[in-house]
Image: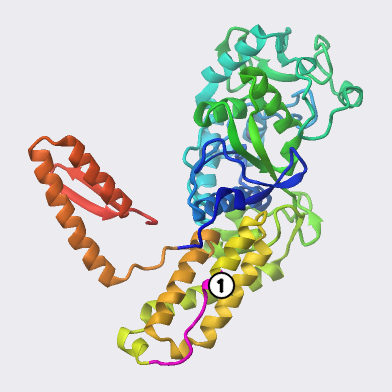
Amino acid sequence: MFPQKASSDFRLFNTLTNRVEPLDLIEPGKLRMYACGPTVYSYAHIGNFRSFLTSDLIVRTAQAIGLKVNYVTNITDVGHLTDDDVADSQGEDRMARALRSKEGESFGNVWDLARHYANVLIADWDRLNLEEPTLRPRATEHIRQQILAVQSLISAGHAYETTQGVYFRVASFPDYGKLSGNRDAAELTELSRELVVDSAKEDPRDFALWKKDDKHLMQWFSPWGWGFPGWHIECSVMANEYLGEEIDLHAGGEDLIFPHHECEIAQAESLTGKQFARHWVHTRFLQVEGEKMSKSKGNFLTVQGLIESKEDGGKGVDPMALRLTLISGHYRKPYNFTMDTLRANTRHVQRLREIRDLLDNVSETEATDKTVEPLVLDDLSARMLDAMLDDLNTPEAIAAVLEGVKRVMAKRDTLGSDDVETAKDWLGHVESLLGIIGRPIAPDPADDASLAAAVETLLSERAVARASRDWARADQIRDELGAMGVEVMDTAEGVTWRRKIDS
Ligand SMILES: [Zn+2]
């Protein structure tokens, strides 16, 4: 177990207040968290994943201090336009443009394309050992909720319709700009004026909630005719749908602060009259070998391209080395990704795996015979956790891991059985907090035998409870088994069980 900590010991920089603050939870013990996911029009690049990894580290750190995390991250599969980042939500839908590109030729239609890139995203997510979110909603599966939200905004006077679409009336929300600091209405208006395409817009700052377009490849029928939702509305709607009207933490890449997150706040707070998110966490950008990543420069690195085997056209990079590299810089500083760092991290990850294998193979008798200074690692587990609680100080947390590697390696030939236990605990902490080893530590076979005996006893109790129709007791036993990391399966052949993955 990690040392006991309170949720207020977890301190994160909050873009909204511009300072590092203790986590202030709406409901004690529970973290409600939303992170903007990718638009699935192409393969995710390492910069996207750097931001997803920040969320992953928040989830892992929160879990390490005993918080129950409800983590929702979306998939944008409609409505994100090429010029959404400027102002007027104009340009072409990124999905449609991808379909017309060379890569798009292999897809039957835009739905097929979205499905493909979403599947690869989830596979990359898994290979980089990111915790599965509680829920991964998709924009196209929440069109009805988005239409209802736009209707509510119109009836409350926060939105209006033109011949081209429905817009959010920025003047109706005086807090617009509180996240990004873009509060000067005149300045913002000036910035957006040139980009206005719909002359019926009341204010150049107003952003699209619904685009009318009966030619669009993905379209739905709405009170305003055929069309599709604006990009910003999906996140407000899905966050509120699954996490409630108020959430603890909202995360994303720094490029999303304005306009995307500013618009999310305007929509959500206008709809509910409550503060949308208490903490806003943003990950800074990433460069490759000192340069901005771009397709034209040939330094555009996708996760897929790096970790795919060489036979499959990839670079065959160890996914855990890539993960370690992407988390090795502090999320609030720009990060320069280099092949040299990746190589160094490959060695670190190999070292951790060597230790894991060593610990699995030290025989009991051999280990107990050694009597020397005991191996001490608890201080390093505590140091690693403290670092993560301190605004996700990953460089410091990783330094603590490397110090642990050194200590274990120095004692590798004289490990006593207590040392083996100590080292296994420490390695478990490293994996649960940073996820850089890549698979759960192999369970001790002795634990397996006693677990099996305990499970069989509970299962026969459950059979008795079920036979006497005592469903409450039967459910209670199932929950007890769940807490032990055991999943019960009632099949036609009878009751079987297995260890839950990752337990
Ligand atoms: Zn979003």
Q: Dividing the picture into quarters, in which one does residue 333 lie?
A: bottom right
Is any part of residue 65 visible from this angle? Answer: yes
Looking at the rendering, the stretch of residues picked out in magenta corresponds to: 370-380
Front residue of 470/145: it is: 470
Q: Callout 1: few (<14), some (14-19), or many (20+) C-alpha neighbours within 10 Å?
A: few
> Is residue 476 shown left or right of residue 342?
left
Callout 1 amino acid? Asp
Front residue of 370/87: it is: 370
Q: Is residue 116 above or below residue 143?
A: below
Q: Is residue 376 above or below residue 289?
A: below
Snapshot colouring = rainbow
Quarter, ligand 1 = top right
Residue that badge 1 annotates: 379
Q: Dividing the picture into quarters, in which one does residue 348 lie?
A: bottom right
The residue that appears at 83% across and 11% down in the rendered structure is: 199
Task: Tell me the SS state at disc 1.
Answer: helix
Q: Residue 369 location in percent, x, y?
A: 35, 92
Q: Residue 292 location in percent, x, y?
A: 79, 52
Query: Does residue 36 belong to the magenta stretch?
Result: no
Front residue of 352/28: it is: 28
Under 8 Å from ligand 1: the CB of mark 1? no
